[in-house]
Image (cartoon, helix red, strand yellow):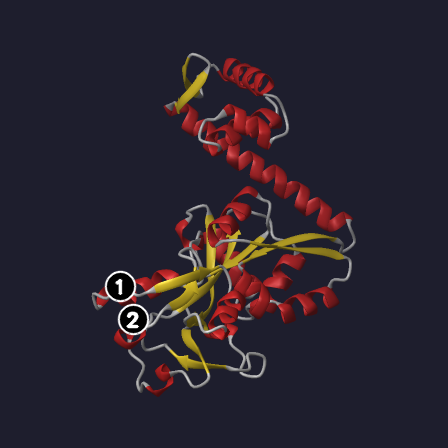
């Protein structure tokens, strides 16, 4: 039995039993993977996958057990490398942080600055993507830490820890009639073209639910992946913006006015995600504590060991 064989069967499962896509993901050939899977099945004396001709069609009952154990073995093998590298590298290494644009642009700059100052020999890389992409990167090991508002808590293989709560605000050009509405209401907002986040980003689901509760369909004229784009189009007079309050700065965003919308939309929780069972290095803990001081090493370790976080915001 070889670790590479275990990587093959786990990747086949991850790719929906598509051997071609598994081979492409692992930079190898489809016949090579099929041969190694067959050899592993012969060694174990069981069929891991059900077949129709040369195609894999399902995971067998014993195959589900084998795959669960294979995932644990591969995770521990990776942990062994991470642990040994930490002690042999003299404090150097690589840390990959995955975050949405809003977090990367508005919440993380000072954290990154301070982390780089503390760990000048650690190569910090940042990947930006959708919450679903971030979850997948952490699950696959492509990212060590994920930060987002949506989606992260929907994956059982991830440990998610609450970082902070935030609310939305409505932005409008100076002098816009909506600024005279006191208090601001959803019914009034629905009269105007709206520019807000794409459906998978930054609390958009809560915006949708708020309008659904009053039985009104908002006129969403444009959607974008980040607040900077939304603010640009609001400045051009194409609509009112609904963005994270974190993303508005009165001095930087001259010509725009923000109106608090915490009473209109549910609050949102930024979460930090870690892959269950992963060995965390000293600099992983340091970055986490810089971003979320309440998430001490003890709290994080307890969450990782117990399968969940006890800390509540």
Q: Which disc, if any, is residue 311?
A: none
Labels 2 & 1 near each other (Cβ < 8 A): yes
Q: Quadrant of the C terminus?
A: bottom left
Q: Which residue is mark 1?
A: 217
Q: Position of residue 115 (x, y in %)?
A: 68, 65
Q: Position of residue 174 (x, y in %)?
A: 46, 84
Relative vertical location of residue 239 with respect to residue 86 in this rendering, above or below = below
Q: Position of residue 243 (x, y in %)?
A: 44, 70
- Cα distance in 3D space between marks 2 and 1: 7 Å
Residue beneath the point at 64% across and 63% down: 286
- Can residue 311 be seen at all in this image of the molecule? no
- Can residue 50 be seen at all in this image of the molecule? yes
Q: Position of residue 177 (x, y in %)?
A: 36, 84
- Residue lying at the far left of the rendered structure: 215
Neighbours of disc 2 within 10 Å: few (<14), some (14-19), many (20+) = some
Q: Which residue is mark 2?
A: 190
Relative vertical location of residue 211 with respect to residue 134 in this rendering, above or below = below
Q: Quadrant of the N terminus?
A: top right
Mark 2 element type: loop
Which image quadrant for residue 212?
bottom left
Residue beneath the point at 25% across and 74% down: 187
- Give the left or right position of residue 56, taking residue 280 as reference: left
């Amino acid at each position: 039995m070889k670790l590479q064989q275990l990587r093959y069967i786990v990747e086949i499962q991850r790719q929906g039993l598509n051997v071609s896509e598994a081979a492409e993901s692992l930079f190898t050939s489809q016949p090579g993977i099929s041969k190694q899977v067959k050899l592993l099945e012969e060694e174990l004396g069981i069929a891991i996958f059900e077949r129709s001709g040369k195609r894999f069609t399902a995971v067998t009952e014993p195959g589900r057990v084998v795959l669960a154990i294979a995932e644990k073995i591969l995770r521990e093998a990776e942990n062994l490398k991470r642990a040994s590298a930490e002690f042999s590298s003299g404090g150097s290494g690589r840390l990959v942080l995955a975050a949405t644009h809003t977090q990367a642009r508005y919440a993380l700059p000072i954290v990154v600055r301070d982390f780089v100052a503390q760990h000048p020999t650690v190569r910090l890389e940042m990947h930006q993507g959708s919450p679903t992409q971030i979850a997948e990167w952490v699950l696959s090991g492509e990212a060590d830490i994920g930060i987002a508002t949506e989606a992260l808590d929907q994956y059982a293989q991830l440990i998610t820890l609450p970082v902070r709560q935030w609310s939305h605000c409505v932005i409008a050009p100076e002098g816009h009639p909506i600024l005279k509405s006191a208090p601001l209401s959803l019914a009034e907002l629905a009269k105007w073209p709206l520019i807000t986040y794409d459906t998978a980003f930054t609390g958009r689901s809560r915006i949708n639910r708020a309008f659904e509760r009053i039985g009104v369909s908002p006129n969403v004229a444009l959607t974008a992946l980040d607040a900077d784009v939304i603010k640009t189009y609001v400045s051009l007079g194409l609509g009112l913006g609904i963005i994270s309050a974190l993303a508005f700065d009165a001095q930087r965003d001259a010509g725009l006015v923000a109106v608090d919308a915490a009473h209109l939309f549910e609050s949102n929780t930024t979460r930090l995600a870690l892959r269950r069972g992963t060995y965390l290095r000293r600099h992983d803990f340091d970055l986490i504590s810089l971003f979320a001081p309440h998430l001490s090493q003890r709290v994080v370790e307890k969450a990782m060991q117990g399968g969940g976080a006890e800390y509540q915001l």
